Amino acid sequence: MRRMRNWIAVLLAGLLLGVQASGPTVLVLKATAYTSSVRETDATPFVTATGARTRFGIIAVSRDLLGSDLPYGSKVKIEDLGDWRSGRGKGRFDAMLKDVVFVVEDTMHKRKRQQIDVWMPDRSLALKWGVRRVRITVLQRGR
């Protein structure tokens, strides 16, 4: 009986340590923006790869991330770290991003790697976004 209690104590301690050691997954990635135009997507510009309708809060991910870190249905928070090259303008889009939980519902072209694409309602906003560095915190991995 005593051995069993010791074994249970060791097992529980290991589980607790495992929970404390692992936190949310955080990724720093390149982020571009896209809109629902045929020139940026395909013949069905308002429909994502999963069949969801485009809206603010939808992101597309590069295929290397889709298979491992950010499968369809993953929910993430996005923090703006500034321009991709210079880092200037850090936080410029945080007010727009802060209360939104983004969902992975779309896929980027196969040539893209380690990148996300944030859906925007209009081209002018997407152009203002440009190419940014973002911190992604994964709230839920997959559906």
Image: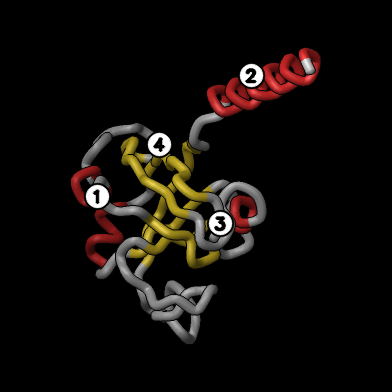
Tell me the residue that label 2 is attached to. 13
Circle nearer the N terminus (1, 2): 2
Indicate whether 44 appears above or below 99: below
Amino acid at circle 2: Ala
**Distance between the alpha carbons at the discs numbered 2 and 3:** 28 Å
Relative side of 7 to 93, left or right: right
Chain-order first, disc 3 or disc 1: 1
Residue at the spot 19% in from the left edge and 46% down from the top edge: 95
On the image, the x and y values in percent for residue 2 come to 77, 13
Image side of residue 121 versus residue 43, left or right? left
Instruction: State yes or no: discs 3 and 4 in contact (Cβ < 8 Å).
Output: no
Amino acid at the residue labelled 1: Asp
Q: Quadrant of residue 110?
A: bottom right
Determine the CA span between mark 3 and mark 1. 20 Å
At x 50% / y 55%, what residue is drawn? 74
CB of mark 4 within 8 Å of CB of mark 1? no
Q: Nearer the viewer, mark 4 or mark 1?
A: 1
Q: Give the CA distance from mark 2 to mark 4.
A: 45 Å
**First of labels 3, 4 by sequence position:** 4
Judging by the rendered image, the residue that carries numbered circle 1 is: 99
User: Circle 3 sits on which residue?
Assistant: 142
Q: Is the N terminus in the top left, top right, bottom left or bottom right quadrant? A: top right
Question: Residue 53's x, y, as percent?
Answer: 39, 77
Q: Nearer the viewer, residue 30 or 78?
A: 78
Could you classify mark 4 by the number of other residues whose Cα lies within 10 Å: few (under 14), some (14-19), or many (20 or more)? few
| Label 2 vs 3, first from the N-terminus | 2
